[in-house]
Amino acid sequence: MNKGEILQYFGKHYENRYIVYVSSIKSDKNNSFFIVKDNNKKYLLVIPGNEMGRQFEGNILENKKINKNEPMIKLCSLNHNNLSLLREIFPYLNPSFCGLQSSFGTGDRLGIATPAHIQAFKDKNIFPVLAQQSVREMARTERNWQKVLDDAIWGCFEAGHEGPFGADADHVKEIKDLKDAVDCGYTMFTLDPSDFIRKDLSKLSKKEINNLYEQISERKDIESLYLKKTYKIKEQELKFDEKSLQEIILTYSEALNHVVKCYEFLKGYKKNDFDLEISVDETPTVTSPLAHLFIVLELKRRGVDFQNLALHFLGDWQKGIEYIGDVKQFAKEFSLHAAIAKKIGGYKLSLHTGSDKFSVYPIFAQETEGLCHIKTAGTSWLEEAKVIAMKDPALYREIHQFALVNFEKDKASYNLTTDLSRIPDIDTISDDKLVNLFKQNDSRQLIHITYGSILRAKDNVGKYIFKDRIYQALFRYEEDHYREVYNHIRRHLELLVSI
Ligand SMILES: [Zn+2]
């Protein structure tokens, strides 16, 4: 059956019970598939035409056949087994390698924003990384690699997206997590060696530093490669003198060893091409151009084939709000990083905590000439919370009060300058003005970072206090949900002007 016939046939019998996602309708070898929803949830509908179609798990819809030649319809749940069958039939539902194309990651903490994300990428020459979650985020949202990937793929199917897209196992620190992500089918791996980066050098005496340095067995070999060497980058000369090289080796050598170990594992374990990102962004200090140069030269020398590098760039990068710092100064220093990347070649620069940094996007895209990757995550969650504030103000008020109580505890792992006293008392704000809270940095960050506590909160009989109601509200107001997320992510993508 073609799209029109399916709609006509289904509409004739079930119009009043289900709403069809028209863009999801797909057929293959006499089997037809599409997504519908009733008042409570979404389903996969299968009109099987052969054995493959009959393998889907589900219930045959009550028979309202007008004549006996009409096909049966199966109502199937959006579960992992059914998705695996769909991925076999439609291989474009599998995530794929991105390489050096411009790319953008849209983390999706609730797992229901993918259709809106896909819409935002329309007509943009930017590779979407639709499944992207860090180990830390998954602990906070009680999700796992498989669930994150499955949710994104169901979103692709609903939207009729025929690929490509990537799946990023973000901020992975341990090989066992890499293994799990490979097993689930992830295509991109972001290694976070921050636990191995030395952060205490500024607090140590010269003697202590020298002692530590003596303990690095490979220091002589590394020195012979870099000491007193200069690199002409743009109009500047970057030189490894004794002091700077010692500091860089002490700071990064253990981290690089860890990266090499992880890479060797991935190379042996992952059968197909994969994108590898090295992230040293979660460090207390800004990555200097000289350290950047050292990291990439060492990675290349040691045979690590990486596509992305995330550095800690100059300025204050906080969650869910604009860049804090001197944009001109950032532009100046960043142009040097971009020039290093260009000179060494073969990799993209990656910007983490990239959401809402509208003032630096044009610089980032232009200087890298599109050899860039950007990650956003919590900003889609913020749009979702905003929709709750717009459509279910009573629920939002409860969430807001709960977030205020949990903020102190939850802020520990973040770099923030949030001042809760600047957030107006929510009891003095009328329902129609709640949305303004999402224009103010302090209230944005309040909701941005407390997501884990909000989603995991349970009452004394073990029932979620907010989670189910959040999903229900966003299901009910799906059009508003998709529109707000689309608008916000689109605004990000539009600013990557030179791509
Ligand atoms: Zn990061």
Image (tube, rainbow, N blue to C red):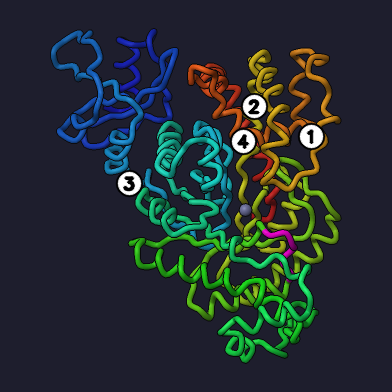
Q: Which residues are magenta?
A: 283-288
| SS for callout 3 | helix
The residue that appears at 50% across and 31% down in the rendered structure is: 112
Question: Which image quadrant for residue 370?
Answer: bottom right
Contact? badges 3 and 1 (CB < 8 Å): no
Residue 126 is situated, as x and y percent measured from the top left of the image, at 56, 51
Q: Which sits earlier in the primary sequence, circle 3 or circle 1?
A: 3
Q: Which of the two discs, 3 and 1, sits closer to the camera?
A: 1
Magenta-drawn stretch contains 408: no
Rendered-image quadrant of the N terminus: top left
Which disc is residue 385 wearing?
2
Q: Which of the two discs, 2 and 1, sits closer to the camera?
A: 1
Query: Is 477 displayed left or right of 7 in the figure?
Result: right
Does residue 259 lie above or below 32 as drawn? below
Rendered-image quadrant of the C terminus: bottom right
Tell me: is circle 1 under 8 Å from ligand 1: no
The residue that appears at 58% across and 50% down in the rendered structure is: 104
Which disc is residue 380 wearing?
4
Alpha-carbon distance for marks 2 and 4?
9 Å
Q: Nearer the viewer, residue 354 or 7?
A: 354
Does residue 199 lie above or below 492 as drawn? below
Does residue 240 lie above or below 134 as drawn? below
Q: Which sits earlier in the primary sequence, circle 4 or circle 1?
A: 4
Alpha-carbon distance for marks 3 and 1?
44 Å
Secondary structure character of the magenta stretch overall = loop
Identify the amino acid type marked 2: Ala
Q: Nearer the viewer, residue 326 or 234?
A: 326
The residue that appears at 35% across and 13% down in the rendered structure is: 11
Q: Circle 1 is placed at which residue position?
A: 442
Contact? badges 3 and 4 (CB < 8 Å): no
Alpha-carbon distance for marks 3 and 2?
34 Å
Tell me: is circle 3 under 8 Å from ligand 1: no
